Amino acid sequence: MTTYITTPIYYVNAMPHIGHAYTTIIADTYARFRRLCGDEVRFQTGTDEHGEKIAQAAEKEGVEPREYVDRISALFRQTWPGLDIAQDHFIRTTDADHIKLVQEILQKVYDNGDIYFSEYSGHYCKGCERFLTEKELVDGKCPDHLTVPEEISEQNYFFRMSKYQEWLIDHIKNNPEYITPERYRNEVLSFLSEPLEDLCISRPCSRLTWGIPLPFDEKFVTYVWFDALINYLTGINYPDGPDFEKYWSEAEHVIAKDILKPHAIYWPTMLQSMGVAPYKRLHVHGYWNVDETKMSKSLGNVIRPGELVEKYGVDTVRYFLLREMSFGRDSSFSTEALEARRNSDLANDVGNLFSRALTMLAKYADSTVPEIDKATVTEEDRVLVDALEKMVADYSTAMNNFEFHKALQSIWEVIGMLNRFIVTNAPWELAKEEERAGRLNTVLYFLADSLRLLALVLRPVMPSAAEKMAAALGMEKKLAKASLKEEDCWGEMEAGTVLHPGESLFPRLAKKKKQQAQGKNQGKKQGKGQGKKVKKKEAEPEIDMKGLITFEQFGDVELRVAEIVTAEKIKKANKLLKLTVKAPEERTLVAGIAKHYSPEDLIGKKVIIVANLKPAKLMGITSQGMVLAAKETDADGNERLVLSTVAEEIAPGSRVA
Ligand code: ME8
């Protein structure tokens, strides 16, 4: 099988931001996933470098278009490796082979009789680089650029797009997967329910020279979209190259909804006119917004991927973008959401799982994967294997359907299950009894093999982290060549494999000390100042702010469910009890609840503890956390303490958020 995946080629009038990064990460992830499934994959991205917008941007900078496009195109190309994006081909519309192909195709379509010369007058939007129909205008303005289009009347060449309207409607109706998600397919069909106009495909040189000259009339250059869409064919050496044969029937384009019309209408009709089969699938995603508005240079709310990578690391950025957006819908970007996912999904869930499992394998098996002891395999183990196999199947379906958030959800369900598996099987308990060594080995094997599978399915999404996981699992080389087969995904970990537990995969993000410090400084400065700002500050109701904490501050407190395993009185301390709890690892706590609870009543209770308190010594015992309780004081000053518990059964160690 082969896969050909493409991104839009980006205009070089703007620097890469997370919108561009998202589309390109999607394509890269899909390319890596299809490779994991054993496909031969070709992944292409690039830059769109002709047209008015680019000519104007160059002029604004006072440089020749060629110099300008070289510079910005290089910027795009240099951005991708930092995001672990590895395209097979980076195409530029100023490449000589592309220019040659555009001219050949124009000539072919012209010779077919599908291009004609005519006069046209209409509303031309410079931002869109096309004539807008009367219907598209909102209050006489372009709805995307909020500018009044120019009234232009000129002679131009037109492509007979209308001729292919019925064919296109049939093709979309007969191939439900041609355009997905469905809402975009419906949008296109709805647009096609009205008569389709022909497409103006030239610009007179009197108005624009930065374009590909028409081969049959040198007084005109090619309209930028007719030029740009052809990149998808140039990159695989249409018509005669072997890659065209190999890949075209499997072509899949990823775009955002802004360029649906050119991809869903212009492009298939162009292909039909040149006698080339339609591409296989078009995947359309929504916008990344910042504070509910689309990112734009003028609003100054553009998020640069490089800055995020520098701060959070490439894996967190890739994971966040893929997990946070439901493919097809708009999503809001915020660093708070990114940091929350980093700390919960990555540091707590997958990061902790790896470090706990590897620590136990080190402690109880000398970092060597033990043999499974078949006699000790339980029903719970079988349920785990079923869940792992279901995960691979669900993940694969979701990845193939471009539902990346769902693919990740299915992985995280299993991560949760594995964290619970550790708690219920308590290897630290098994290790205490020699006769249970067989069971300990089985549990450790199941953990090691599950980590192997996780490293495999996470590879397309977080290639760098997955590589570290593979290295820790002592199977870098093996995993790099591994393929994902749903049938035999379980039990591939070889007993005897030596593990190399390394540093933590996703350290928790530290508290934002800097910002707090800045906040303090600002307060000081404002206090000293005399201007308006001070007034505003003074007008703020001080009392309301007192005691309020930020989300980040709360996020720093790690609350967990803990099961009380033992409880005993402490000599000479009539208020204190010494508790051993599972949370999920065993720890000792000293709690001031002796007057309210007798030790035997506490065994088995699931309470809530602060799990990340610095250990403190009380009556010579080190307390590794704090139990939470509610305090009631009656009119006589008598105190009553009630332990905080959970309303339903839940695994010890579960986070309370
Ligand atoms: O349209 N959210 O190039 P372009 C999500 N050259 N994705 C976004 C985004 C956002 N806020 N902003 C941009 C062009 N994108 C043409 C394409 S293809 C033959 C020619 C991404 O630089 C998204 O993929 O305006 C969108 O479709 C693309 O960048 C537009 O890039």
Image (cartoon, rainbow, N blue to C red):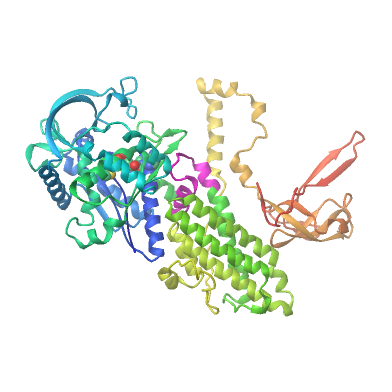
Which of the 4 image quarters holds residue 328?
top left
Residue 607 rendering spot, x and y as whole percentages: 76, 52
Residue visible at 45% across and 66% down in the picture:
484
Residue visible at 22% across and 47% down in the picture:
271
Residue 321 rendering spot, x and y as whole percentages: 45, 47
535 relative to 389, above or below:
above
Image side of residue 252 versus residue 205, left or right? right
Magenta region, residue range:
311-340
Image side of residue 433 versus residue 388, left or right? right
The tally of labels here is: 0
Q: Is residue 448 visible?
A: yes
Residue 27 rendering spot, x and y as whole percentages: 37, 52
| Magenta span includes 325 | yes
Image side of residue 472 versus residue 201, left or right? right
Q: Nearer the viewer, residue 641 or 625?
A: 641
Which of the 4 image quarters holds residue 41?
bottom left
| Magenta span includes 305 | no
Report the quarter where the N terminus lies: bottom left
Point out the residue furthest to the right here: 636
Residue 3 rendering spot, x and y as whole percentages: 33, 59
Q: Is residue 10 visible?
A: no
Split into quadrants, the picture shows ligand 1 in the one at top left
Residue visible at 56% across and 26% down in the picture:
527
Image side of residue 296 versus residue 414, left or right? left
